[in-house]
Amino acid sequence: MGNITLTMIKPVAVKNGYTGKILEKITSAGFRIQALRMLRMSKADAEKFYEVHKERPFYGELTDFMSSGPVVAAILEKENAVEDYRKLIGATNPANAEEGTIRKMYATDIQANAVHGSDSDENAEIEASFFFSKKERYKQDGNLI
Ligand code: GDP
Protein backbone atom coordinates (compact mmCIF):
# COMPACT_ATOMS: atom_id res chain seq x y z
CA MET A 1 0.00 0.00 0.00
CA GLY A 2 1.56 3.27 -1.15
CA ASN A 3 0.92 6.72 0.23
CA ILE A 4 0.96 8.90 -2.88
CA THR A 5 -1.06 9.34 -6.05
CA LEU A 6 -0.71 11.70 -9.00
CA THR A 7 -3.64 13.78 -10.13
CA MET A 8 -4.18 16.20 -12.97
CA ILE A 9 -7.13 18.54 -13.19
CA LYS A 10 -7.80 18.23 -16.93
CA PRO A 11 -8.00 21.17 -19.39
CA VAL A 12 -11.79 21.64 -19.55
CA ALA A 13 -12.14 21.59 -15.75
CA VAL A 14 -9.35 24.18 -15.45
CA LYS A 15 -10.95 26.30 -18.19
CA ASN A 16 -14.35 26.08 -16.49
CA GLY A 17 -12.88 27.47 -13.27
CA TYR A 18 -13.20 24.33 -11.15
CA THR A 19 -9.57 24.19 -9.96
CA GLY A 20 -10.25 25.70 -6.54
CA LYS A 21 -13.38 23.63 -5.91
CA ILE A 22 -11.63 20.40 -6.90
CA LEU A 23 -8.57 21.13 -4.73
CA GLU A 24 -10.90 21.90 -1.82
CA LYS A 25 -12.64 18.55 -2.28
CA ILE A 26 -9.27 16.79 -2.39
CA THR A 27 -7.90 18.38 0.78
CA SER A 28 -11.23 17.99 2.62
CA ALA A 29 -11.03 14.27 1.89
CA GLY A 30 -7.76 14.12 3.82
CA PHE A 31 -5.18 14.27 1.04
CA ARG A 32 -2.12 16.44 1.63
CA ILE A 33 -0.58 18.25 -1.35
CA GLN A 34 3.11 17.29 -1.69
CA ALA A 35 3.66 19.15 -4.98
CA LEU A 36 1.51 21.34 -7.24
CA ARG A 37 1.90 23.03 -10.62
CA MET A 38 -0.14 24.43 -13.53
CA LEU A 39 1.33 23.66 -16.94
CA ARG A 40 0.37 23.01 -20.53
CA MET A 41 1.61 19.69 -21.90
CA SER A 42 2.87 19.49 -25.46
CA LYS A 43 1.26 16.85 -27.70
CA ALA A 44 4.49 14.82 -27.25
CA ASP A 45 4.24 15.11 -23.44
CA ALA A 46 0.64 13.89 -23.52
CA GLU A 47 1.59 11.00 -25.82
CA LYS A 48 4.32 9.99 -23.40
CA PHE A 49 2.08 10.28 -20.34
CA TYR A 50 -0.65 8.13 -21.95
CA GLU A 51 1.72 5.74 -23.76
CA VAL A 52 -0.02 2.71 -22.18
CA HIS A 53 -3.12 3.68 -24.16
CA LYS A 54 -1.42 4.08 -27.52
CA GLU A 55 -3.25 1.12 -29.08
CA ARG A 56 -6.65 2.44 -27.93
CA PRO A 57 -8.85 4.10 -30.58
CA PHE A 58 -9.14 7.32 -28.58
CA TYR A 59 -5.36 7.85 -28.10
CA GLY A 60 -5.09 10.64 -30.71
CA GLU A 61 -8.19 12.44 -29.48
CA LEU A 62 -7.19 12.05 -25.82
CA THR A 63 -3.67 13.41 -26.34
CA ASP A 64 -5.02 16.33 -28.42
CA PHE A 65 -7.40 17.11 -25.58
CA MET A 66 -4.81 16.81 -22.83
CA SER A 67 -2.50 19.22 -24.67
CA SER A 68 -5.28 21.69 -25.55
CA GLY A 69 -4.79 23.88 -22.47
CA PRO A 70 -3.17 23.96 -19.05
CA VAL A 71 -3.68 21.23 -16.49
CA VAL A 72 -3.07 21.40 -12.75
CA ALA A 73 -0.82 18.51 -11.69
CA ALA A 74 -0.38 17.51 -8.06
CA ILE A 75 1.15 14.77 -5.95
CA LEU A 76 -1.30 13.84 -3.21
CA GLU A 77 -0.33 12.05 0.00
CA LYS A 78 -2.57 9.93 2.17
CA GLU A 79 -2.55 6.40 3.50
CA ASN A 80 -3.90 4.14 0.72
CA ALA A 81 -3.76 7.15 -1.64
CA VAL A 82 -4.30 5.40 -5.00
CA GLU A 83 -7.39 3.47 -3.99
CA ASP A 84 -8.92 6.24 -1.87
CA TYR A 85 -8.43 8.80 -4.63
CA ARG A 86 -10.00 6.51 -7.25
CA LYS A 87 -13.02 6.32 -4.91
CA LEU A 88 -13.14 10.11 -4.54
CA ILE A 89 -13.01 10.73 -8.31
CA GLY A 90 -15.52 8.05 -9.36
CA ALA A 91 -15.90 6.01 -12.55
CA THR A 92 -14.04 6.92 -15.77
CA ASN A 93 -17.33 7.73 -17.46
CA PRO A 94 -19.01 10.47 -15.39
CA ALA A 95 -22.39 9.08 -16.40
CA ASN A 96 -21.55 6.04 -14.24
CA ALA A 97 -19.86 7.95 -11.42
CA GLU A 98 -21.47 7.95 -7.99
CA GLU A 99 -23.10 11.09 -6.59
CA GLY A 100 -20.65 13.32 -4.76
CA THR A 101 -17.59 12.11 -6.69
CA ILE A 102 -15.40 14.66 -8.48
CA ARG A 103 -16.20 13.27 -11.91
CA LYS A 104 -19.93 13.28 -11.20
CA MET A 105 -19.74 16.90 -10.04
CA TYR A 106 -17.31 18.43 -12.53
CA ALA A 107 -16.89 16.21 -15.62
CA THR A 108 -18.35 16.87 -19.03
CA ASP A 109 -17.96 13.46 -20.71
CA ILE A 110 -15.82 10.30 -20.71
CA GLN A 111 -12.82 12.09 -22.22
CA ALA A 112 -13.13 15.43 -20.44
CA ASN A 113 -13.67 13.61 -17.15
CA ALA A 114 -12.32 16.43 -14.94
CA VAL A 115 -9.39 14.66 -13.30
CA HIS A 116 -6.76 11.98 -13.66
CA GLY A 117 -5.84 9.61 -10.84
CA SER A 118 -3.04 7.02 -10.88
CA ASP A 119 -4.21 3.41 -11.11
CA SER A 120 -1.43 1.71 -9.10
CA ASP A 121 1.33 2.55 -6.61
CA GLU A 122 3.92 1.82 -9.28
CA ASN A 123 2.30 4.18 -11.79
CA ALA A 124 1.85 6.84 -9.09
CA GLU A 125 5.64 6.97 -8.65
CA ILE A 126 6.28 7.02 -12.41
CA GLU A 127 3.67 9.74 -12.97
CA ALA A 128 4.88 11.80 -10.00
CA SER A 129 8.40 11.79 -11.50
CA PHE A 130 6.95 12.74 -14.89
CA PHE A 131 5.87 16.14 -13.51
CA PHE A 132 8.00 16.82 -10.45
CA SER A 133 11.61 16.56 -9.33
CA LYS A 134 12.50 15.66 -5.75
CA LYS A 135 13.22 19.38 -5.22
CA GLU A 136 9.54 20.17 -5.73
CA ARG A 137 8.07 17.69 -3.25
CA TYR A 138 7.47 18.73 0.35
CA LYS A 139 6.84 16.79 3.52
CA GLN A 140 4.29 17.82 6.15
CA ASP A 141 7.05 19.54 8.12
CA GLY A 142 7.87 21.82 5.19
CA ASN A 143 11.14 20.13 4.27
CA LEU A 144 11.85 18.48 0.93
CA ILE A 145 11.02 14.76 0.62
P1 GDP B 1 -9.08 6.32 -15.84
O1 GDP B 1 -7.99 5.51 -15.19
O2 GDP B 1 -10.38 6.28 -15.07
O3 GDP B 1 -8.64 7.75 -16.13
O4 GDP B 1 -9.42 5.64 -17.23
P2 GDP B 1 -8.51 4.96 -18.35
O5 GDP B 1 -7.12 4.72 -17.86
O6 GDP B 1 -9.27 3.80 -18.89
O7 GDP B 1 -8.46 6.05 -19.52
C1 GDP B 1 -7.59 7.15 -19.47
C2 GDP B 1 -8.33 8.37 -19.94
O8 GDP B 1 -8.68 8.20 -21.31
C3 GDP B 1 -9.67 8.63 -19.25
O9 GDP B 1 -9.55 9.30 -18.03
C4 GDP B 1 -10.40 9.47 -20.29
O10 GDP B 1 -9.95 10.84 -20.27
C5 GDP B 1 -9.93 8.83 -21.59
N1 GDP B 1 -10.88 7.81 -22.06
C6 GDP B 1 -11.17 6.60 -21.50
N2 GDP B 1 -12.07 5.93 -22.25
C7 GDP B 1 -12.35 6.73 -23.32
C8 GDP B 1 -13.19 6.61 -24.45
O11 GDP B 1 -13.89 5.61 -24.65
N3 GDP B 1 -13.22 7.67 -25.34
C9 GDP B 1 -12.45 8.78 -25.15
N4 GDP B 1 -12.53 9.77 -26.06
N5 GDP B 1 -11.63 8.94 -24.09
C10 GDP B 1 -11.59 7.94 -23.18
Image: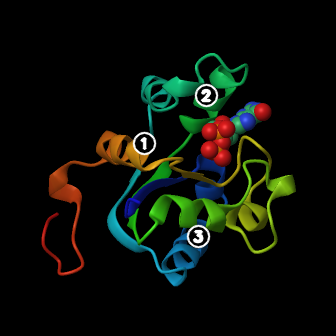
Q: Give percent across and percent down for residue 10.
A: 58, 50
Residue 17 appears in the rendering: no
Label 2 environment density (alpha carbons within 10 Å; few <14, some 14–19, many ≥20):
some
Image point 68% across, 66% down: which residue?
Answer: 102
Q: Are marks 2 and 3 in contact (CB under 8 Å)?
A: no
Disc 1 on helix, strand or loop? helix
Give the side of residue 6 with respect to residue 15, left or right.
left
Depicted 143 relative to depicted 64: above or below: below
Cα separation, mark 1 vs mark 3, equals: 22 Å
Identify the residue under disc 1: 123
Label 3 environment density (alpha carbons within 10 Å; few <14, some 14–19, many ≥20):
many
Identify the residue under disc 3: 22
Q: Nearer the viewer, residue 117 or 122?
A: 122
Q: Nearer the viewer, residue 6 or 79?
A: 79
The answer to whether the beta carbon of the residue marked 3 is less than 8 Å from any atom of ligand 1 is no
| Residue farthest top in this picture | 55
Q: Which kind of residue does numbered mark 3 sit on?
A: Ile
Identify the residue under disc 2: 64
Q: Which kind of residue does numbered mark 2 sit on?
A: Asp
Give the side of residue 104 with respect to residue 16, left or right.
right
Q: Give percent across and percent down for residue 86.
A: 60, 59
Q: Give percent across and percent down for residue 84.
A: 56, 67
Image point 78% across, 52% down: which residue?
Answer: 108
Q: Which kind of residue does numbered mark 1 sit on?
A: Asn
